[in-house]
Image (spheres, rainbow, N blue to C red):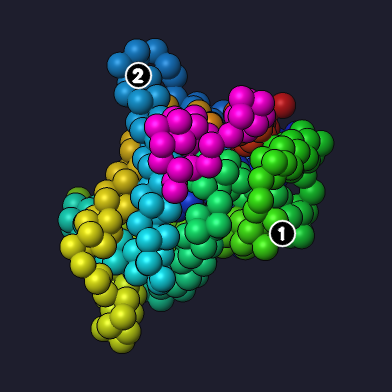
């Protein structure tokens, strides 16, 4: 991945975290959300672009709304997966494949809208694309497997353990030492995960699935940044280099189109993965709508309020999942969410909030300049 960028005067690596299929693409070349190790120290002007001024109330309001919508859409997508994936044997796998076929088709217009006037060399972006898609599918398959075992109100906050995986990967790279604040964030995320595990029947197998899931998404983040870098040399129809946000949007759309192609191939090779009835087809559209709309909203959030604030907003999906799960259990949807006592509910809200705080500390510290 090359040498890591380091905050000026601190010796700290520039590492930041975002959710699955990150929108690190919105960052200027000075740093990145998922990779954290490719760029030189950012000048002050780059940091000002990274965290836009909040002088415009309208932009701030829209950005916050987009970030919260992205978090809510992710939480809803987990509920859809649990609701439909657990109804019949093989339901989760069929939903995974069919939903990504829908998302691939929906991403084609985005590719057309973002297509540059001149594409970069194919082999420059083909390999990171393959890596990002492969690791992303590992992560998504892990999410679907975990949701068959435990409710979404516990899965969503635990996905914050991706921070631990990223820290482990970064610490093994040359000059990849993390500072004490970043390690404090890692410890906080582990404590939060321990609080979420208490009082549940998930056990070690489910925790292992969650960790594999987080590892898949973390590696996908790294490949996504490589894909963005490969897209950056593309030029617009006017012959000008495209912006990093443009390159990121293109990378996201191309990635989901590639996922759709793989899903179509899987459906041709294994007919048993096809929808069995109208209900399964509707479920695929519901999941695709929730997940993909969340990704689009996440990009809008990064563009309006910056990647640091956007990361924190997106991390609130864990808290939303806990609250939404309690409401569903109270409403009688016990096949979706387990009913818990007041003490357990409060502990889960605190744990999910601690996970948000850990991610916020990790992100802000990795982008800070002394």
Residue 41 shown left or right of residue 174 in the figure: left
Which residue shows up at 61% across the image and 25% down it? 342
For disc 2, the neighbor class at 10 Å (few under 14, some 14 to 19, many from 20) is some
Q: Quadrant of residue 13?
A: top right
The answer to whether residue 70 is above or below residue 237 is above
Instruction: Give how far apart the Cα atoms at labels 1 and 2 are.
Output: 42 Å
Q: Which residues are magenta?
A: 320-348
Residue 278 visible? The answer is yes
Q: Is residue 9 above or below residue 293?
A: above
Residue at which label 1 appears: 204
Q: Which residue is mark 2?
A: 61
Residue positioned 66% across, 45% down in the render: 200
The quarter of the image holding the N terminus is: bottom right
Q: Nearer the viewer, residue 259 or 228?
A: 259
Element type at marker 1?
Answer: helix
Seen as rendered, the residue at the extreme bottom is 269
Residue 246 is tagged as none
């Amino acid at each position: 991945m090359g040498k890591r960028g380091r905050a000026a005067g601190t010796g700290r690596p520039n590492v930041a975290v975002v959710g699955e299929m990150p929108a690190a693409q919105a960052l200027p070349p000075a740093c990145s959300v998922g990779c954290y190790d490719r760029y030189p120290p950012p000048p002050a002007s780059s940091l000002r672009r990274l965290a836009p001024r909040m002088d415009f109330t309208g932009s701030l309001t829209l950005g916050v709304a987009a970030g919260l919508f992205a978090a809510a859409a992710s939480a809803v997508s987990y509920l859809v997966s649990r609701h439909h994936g657990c109804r019949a044997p093989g339901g989760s796998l069929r939903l995974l494949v069919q939903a990504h076929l829908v998302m691939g088709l929906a991403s084609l217009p985005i590719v057309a809208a973002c297509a540059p006037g001149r594409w970069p060399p194919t082999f420059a972006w083909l390999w990171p694309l393959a890596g990002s898609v492969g690791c992303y599918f590992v992560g998504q398959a892990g999410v679907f497997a975990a949701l068959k075992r435990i409710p979404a109100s516990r899965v969503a906050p635990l996905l914050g353990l991706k921070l631990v995986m990223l820290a482990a990967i970064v610490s093994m790279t040359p000059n990849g030492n993390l500072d004490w604040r970043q390690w404090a964030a890692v410890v906080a995320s582990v404590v939060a995960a321990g609080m979420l595990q208490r009082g549940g029947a998930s056990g070690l197998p489910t925790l292992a699935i969650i960790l594999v899931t987080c590892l898949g998404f973390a590696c996908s983040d790294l490949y996504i940044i490589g894909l963005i870098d490969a897209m950056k040399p593309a030029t617009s129809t006017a012959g000008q280099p495209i912006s990093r946000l443009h390159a990121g949007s293109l990378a996201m759309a191309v990635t989901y189109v590639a996922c759709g192609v793989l899903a179509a191939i899987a459906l041709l090779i294994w007919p048993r993965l096809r929808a069995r009835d109208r209900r399964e087809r509707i479920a695929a559209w519901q999941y695709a709508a929730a997940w993909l709309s969340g990704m689009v909203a996440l990009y809008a959030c990064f563009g309006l309020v910056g990647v640091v604030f956007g990361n924190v907003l997106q991390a609130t999906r864990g808290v939303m999942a806990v609250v939404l799960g309690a409401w569903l259990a109270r409403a009688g949807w016990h096949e979706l969410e387990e009913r818990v006592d007041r003490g357990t509910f409060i502990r889960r809200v605190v744990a999910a909030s601690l996970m948000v705080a850990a991610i916020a500390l990790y992100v802000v510290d990795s982008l800070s300049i002394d």
